[in-house]
Amino acid sequence: MKYRIEHDTMGEIKVPDDKYWGAQTERSKRNFLIGQRKMPFEMISALAILKKAAAHTNYQLENLEREKAEMISKVADEIIEGKLCSHFPLRVFQTGSGTQTNMNVNEVIANRGNQLAGFKLLHPNEDVNRAQSSNDTFPSAMHIAARILFEEKLLPEVRLLSDAMKKLEKQYSHVIKIGRTHLQDATPLTFGQEISGWKSMLEHDYRMIEKSLDELSELALGGTAVGTGLNAPAGFGTAAAQKISEITGKKFYSGENKFYCLTSKGALTFASGAMKTLAADLMKIANDVRWLASGPRSGLGEIRIPENEPGSSIMPGKVNPTQCEAMTMACVQVMGNDSVIGFASSQGNFELNVYMPLIIDNFLESANLLVDAIHSFCQNCVIGIEPNEEKMQENVNNSLMLVTALNLHIGYENAAKIAQKAYRENITLREAALRLNLVEGKDFDEWADPQKMI
């Protein structure tokens, strides 16, 4: 491998000749061989968006020459398009401010820009990072990456799953089944009504995630090192946020209190909490589906789900609820990530939180996991759910909880006597009611009609 010599304030260092990164990236690459997790592409892309906006803003404020601004913008576009991914090698476990990844982006833009220009046009610190600090660029990019992922991927997938549930709700609104509370028989409902509960969960979760978008729109850019705005021209933060909004098509604004923006990670913690809520509801839905599909002969067996692949290496013909299992594993990971994010968010000291790479890595992993898991669950399971109407009807007929409809007519205690007698003697509720002389046959048939109980 061929090398070239790069230098920074600490001196010279050898860098692979085919890479655009510079001395600070190389030092980080060597000094932080911790784990295998590299900075997510969404974060690199968000930093590139920020650098492009900052360059335009600096030019607009007469703080950077036009040629330099245009070159920074050109290389930033290459990064955003995914053309330079191999030039971002740094691990997540690095400096807690993300300074080394910020410099990685600065160095790649400068060196690639100089290559395109044919001469040394750009300096990573003086030009690409002008009017910025890692302390305000990194948290700003975190918000940019989070909001883009939420709006362009996660929310659309939640909506698609909700729409699939809505279709099933309507399709099976006539199918009566037994309800269950505490894993015990309860009063009847329709399968459509049960599904409507799942759908409503997703609709509520959608709105909770939406509520987090405004907080994620607040940017620290312009606060520079500690929040005072030192080395940034007046109006830089506001103008840069407007430019970021133009580039992304998303609404971003400059944070009013930059001291808050630099040190607090509250917006991401709140948004992660919304994802955790979604994960909790998805866990519930997936567990309901696999319980209802259990069997096929020795379980509940009230629904059929798509048979996507063999379920056992030893039991022929066995098919398992694998999409439910994949979904619940993803949900557990999201819940674990939320704990990491919450704890890391609490660890800010004075004017800076130094757990930012960890926070955004876990955040983006959660969002991407939910995007993929929801899509897979919807396409490979939910849209193929079918009720086993014969089994549902059998369970309704066998349920002791139809006796609840008699409460208003014969009282709770007498209704309980009927249920207990039917259970002890393994007879129907109707038979028990007649033997106890508590209800006449025609009244029982009228009062304990499942159609009237939904």
Image (cartoon, helix red, strand yellow):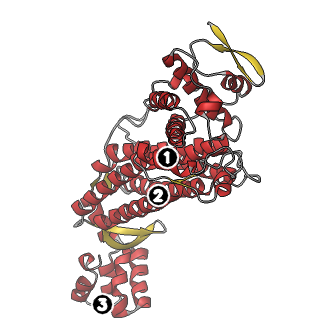
Q: Nearer the viewer, residue 361 or 436?
A: 361
In this rendering, position of residue 141 left or right of residue 156: right
Label 2's element?
helix
**Residue at mark 3:** 439
Please identify, in this view, whether the residue under mark 1 or under mark 3 is nearer the observer. 1
In this rendering, position of residue 204 left or right of residue 303: right
How far apart in space, not on screen, are marks 1 and 2 (Cα)?
Answer: 11 Å
Q: Amino acid at mark 1?
A: Ala
Q: Quadrant of the C terminus?
A: bottom left
How far apart in space, not on screen, are marks 3 and 2 (Cα)?
Answer: 52 Å
Q: Residue at x 54, y 38 (%)?
A: 47
How far apart in space, not on screen, are marks 1 and 3 (Cα)?
Answer: 57 Å
Q: Quadrant of the N terminus?
A: top right
Label 3's element?
loop
* Residue 209: mark: 2
Residue 303: x and y in percent read 31, 55
Residue 260: x and y in percent read 66, 57
How packed is label 3: few (under 14 Cα within 10 Å), some, or many (20 or more)? many
The tag earlier along the polypeptide, 3 or 2, is: 2
Q: Amino acid at mark 3?
A: Val
In this rendering, position of residue 72 left or right of residue 136: left
Q: Residue at x 32, y 41 (%)?
A: 307
**Residue at mark 1:** 367
In this rendering, position of residue 38 left or right of residue 146: right
